[in-house]
Image: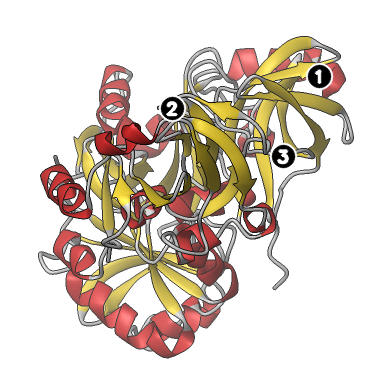
Amino acid sequence: MYPEEYHYTKDHEWIKVENDEAVVGITDFAQKQLGDVVYVELPQVGAVFEFHQSLGVIESVKAVSDIYSPLSGEVIAINEELDGSPEIVNEDPHGKGWIIRLKLRDETEIEKLMSVSEYEKFLEGLED
Amino acid sequence: MKTTKLYSSQKKLGAKMIEFFGWEMPVNFSGIIEEHMAVRTKAGLFDVSHMGEIMISGKQALDFVQYLTPNNAARLTPDKAQYTALTTPKGTFIDDMLVYCLDEDKYLCVVNAANSDKDYEWILSHKGGFDVSVENQSDRYTQLAIQGREAEAILQSLTGINLDEMKTFRTARGSVAGVGALVSRTGYTGEDGFEIYTQSENPAKIWDALLEEGKTRGLLPIGLGARDTLRLEATLMLYGNDIDETTTVLEAGLGWLVKFKKGDFLGREVLLKQKEEGLRRKIVGFEILGRGIARPHYSVFINGEKVSAVNSGSYSPYLKKSIGLTYLPIEHTEEGTELDVEIRGHLVKAKVIPLPFYKRDY
């Protein structure tokens, strides 16, 4: 279910590190919690975010939820498909439903993230 | 937390549960949008057993119901139900509800889950000299709703009640899937449909049979999430969001249920005065023209001045836009009036549009 090579946060974001860049999305658990996503508010390319700063908002029919920057860095791409088809976040959260691509400022921050086994254990702890 | 008798049936179907005023209820099964569209185009099945039921019976039951509510309960016969309200002396809402006449001297009030204890206390405290008894029967009833254009065909295959002959707001008693029930042509979705009440210990028989029978007609189980978006599109008020003890029946656009000629009732004087003098504010519908979704309590501005807050507000799965309700000063209620809604610190354009947002075409 959760890709082995990704990193994860307690805010239910996934991070795919590629050299000094990172692709960020929300996890399958997060999209299920949110339900049908109808709107994603994304930052501008070039915006710079600190670790755990709110970089955007996901709205589902029922809820509004912040997307937190899992690492500090500069936005170098946003998933423009989400503008017209936000439901991709539900359909393929770990792939086509990616949200932003960051240029990392401090690669040592990656060590603070959870591995897939840590994230899965974290999820087990949330159930009941 | 309280659960309904259909809890395990719903868990088996993969329901995602939430707490709703002390009840553990399904918020969705397959997803709010899919469920919403199933009801709009085919049919959906709801467990609404969390609703409260309060029985008013006795020699003066009708007189008492007339005193408590603005609609004319004298028009009820044992095959009819009526949408009405429990009103305060100020003409505002203790609750909105359906009243079923079960017999000449027996009236069953179906009230909101969140209000059932408050309503029961309210009704008891106004009993005064009326020769009636009042009983909170909320724990006895399971209530199902089957809604959508396919509802009649699906339900008909499981009951001897002639549904084709049953008009809106009519009721009948009979058996559904072999279980004794009260059926009414009512609902909270804007679609044709039925509500089914039973005191059976095994109401899952009805639930399961309807789902099985409805399979080929596209019937889906529906959670509270889609129930809310469906009722908002149809502009059916939600207590606590759109109406409460601060909003009058007239301001809420429900003047049609106030029957001044029937005689005295709680709030009559204030409502009559309000009608004669004209309203100072009333509920309107709006759509968001920019980006984002108007949620309850967001501020509403006209020409830079805060005029109100959003009552209900949501994404509308059928209309595919963000819609909402708010109470505006009467001079700003005209269709087309431009508004700004503050969404996370930004003012987003909106405009007043006619109600209801959605009306079925069959």
Chain of the residue under label 2: B
Q: Residues within 10 Å of mark 2 (few under 14, many from 20)?
A: many
Foreground disc of the pair 1, 2:
1
Tell me the SS state at disc 2.
helix
**CB within 8 Å, label 1 to label 2:** no
Q: Picture coordinates of residue B11 (x, y %)?
A: 19, 63
Mark 3–mark 2 distance (CA, rounded to whole Å): 44 Å
Query: Which quarter of the figure has residue B19?
Result: top left
Q: How many numbered callouts?
A: 3
Query: Amino acid type of disc 1?
Result: Ile
- Residue sitting at x 51%, y 59%: A97
Give the camera-side residue of B59 and B151: B151
Chain of the residue under label 3: B
Residue that carries the numbered disc 3 in the rendered image: B291
Which image quadrant: the C terminus of chain B?
Answer: bottom right
**CB within 8 Å, label 3 to label 1:** no
Give the camera-side residue of B78 and A95: A95
In the picture as drawn, the residue positioned furthest to the front comes out as A19
Give the camera-side residue of B338 and A80: A80
Q: Is residue B263 above or below residue A28?
A: above
In the drawing, does residue B208 fall left or right of residue B301? left
Q: Picture coordinates of residue B250 (x, y %)?
A: 67, 26
Question: Both on one chain, marks 3 and 2?
Answer: yes
Q: Picture coordinates of residue A54 (x, y %)?
A: 49, 28
Query: Amino acid type of disc 3?
Result: Arg
Q: Is residue A11 above or below residue B131?
A: below
Q: Earlier in the sequence, mark 3 or mark 1?
A: 3
Mark 1–mark 2 distance (CA, rounded to whole Å): 28 Å
Residue that carries the numbered disc 2 in the rendered image: B68
Query: Amino acid type of disc 2?
Result: Leu
Residue that carries the numbered disc 1 in the rendered image: B330
Foreground disc of the pair 3, 2:
3
